[in-house]
Amino acid sequence: MEQSRIVYFGTADFAVPPLQSLLACPENFDVVAVVSQPDRPAGRHRERLPSPVSAMVQRSKLPLLQPESVDLPFLEALRGLRADLFVVAAYGRILPRQVLEMPKLGSVNLHGSLLPKYRGASPIQSAILDGETETGVTLILMDEKMDHGPILATAIETIREDDDYLSLAGRLSEAAAGLLTDSLTRLADGTLHTQEQDHSLATFTKMIRKEDGLIDWTTADAWEVERRMRAYRPWPGIHFDWTTRNGHTVRTRLLATEVVHANGQTPGAVIETENGLPAVVVADDEAVLLVEVQPEGRRPMSGADFLRGYPPSETI
């Protein structure tokens, strides 16, 4: 096949392996530039840090564009690259039609679900939250609507019982890398055909916020808490307010848990199990075992140490 000139749009960790896969095939793909979001303040000291994609590109000789907005200078820079194709993966911004239609082969997007399910910002977390046993990656030809365009290819991935966001996203990004190089080769030579999405089956995900990790023990479901812990690892994590016997409230992060039987206790009650670990009763006569926790401002500790150091009121 003739070498394709590609501009790659990506920001998050998920976008790194697909970019690496393109760079590993220089005989087929010429990545002429990479577009990533600008460096953002992060960490305790609010130091401006590059995105995972930007950090990778900065170690290479690839041209890197980090526009604050899709303005005229950025559009002119894109046109000047004379790309055959734009590839988008976890870029974090919606691109307008004038960008999507710029390359002669169009623009494609790698999305971390089996579309049309889980369109939007958090497909991987949402699949874990919903207790799905299967998900995947979809490569689509982009249009103006979010995750809406015709499907070019898919790769299916099993969700394991112990998968958290990090482990599942890692496997999906590797699957995306393999799917991308094979599919783009076929797209360039005209042997890859599109399939319209069934939009009546579309489901949508939301942007995850810090407050989504807060547990209300009086309404929570035990298995939902367990899935939230895995889906929201590492961010935002899940946390709860623990009221001690002397009336102090301690914001606490839940790091490891199991689901146990509650023996008819009231939701929100704290019970001590036979192995000395605390458990918080939730709905359906189940309880969430606090295997490992981290009180705010303290080191991680076992649930047993937490129970001794922060003896609870009857309910939290």
Image (spheres, helix red, strand yellow):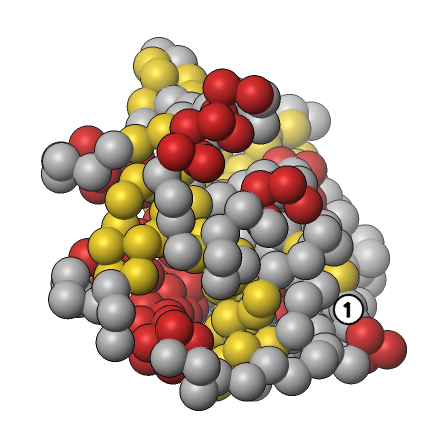
CA neighbours of label 1 inside 10 A, class few (<14), some (14 to 19), many (20+): few
Horizontal arrangement in the rendering, residue 283 relative to residue 17 (left or right):
right
In this rendering, the answer to whether 262 lies above or below 296 is below
In the image, 260 versus 211, the foreground residue is 211
Q: Amino acid at mark 1?
A: Thr
Query: Is residue 202 something that shows in the picture?
Result: yes
In the image, 37 versus 212, the foreground residue is 37
Which of the 4 quarters of the picture holds residue 163? bottom left
Query: Is residue 307 something that shows in the picture?
Result: no
For mark 1, what is the residue? 203
Q: Position of residue 308 (x, y in %)?
A: 45, 43
In this rendering, the answer to whether 104 lies above or below 300 is below
Residue at image x 43%, y 45%? 9
Q: Quadrant of the N terminus?
A: bottom left
Q: Quadrant of the C terminus?
A: top right
In the image, 105 versus 115, the foreground residue is 105
Q: Position of residue 309 (x, y in %)?
A: 45, 37
In this rendering, the answer to whether 156 lies above or below 117 is below
Residue at image x 70%, y 74%? 116
Q: Secondary structure at mark 1?
A: loop
In the image, 184 versus 202, the foreground residue is 184
Q: Position of residue 250 (x, y in %)?
A: 58, 30
Horizontal arrangement in the rendering, residue 114 relative to residue 23 (left or right):
right
Horizontal arrangement in the rendering, residue 88 relative to residue 28 (left or right):
right
Which of the 4 quarters of the picture holds residue 114? bottom right
Q: Position of residue 247 (x, y in %)?
A: 69, 27
Which of the 4 quarters of the picture holds residue 300? top left
Residue at image x 31%, y 72%? 181
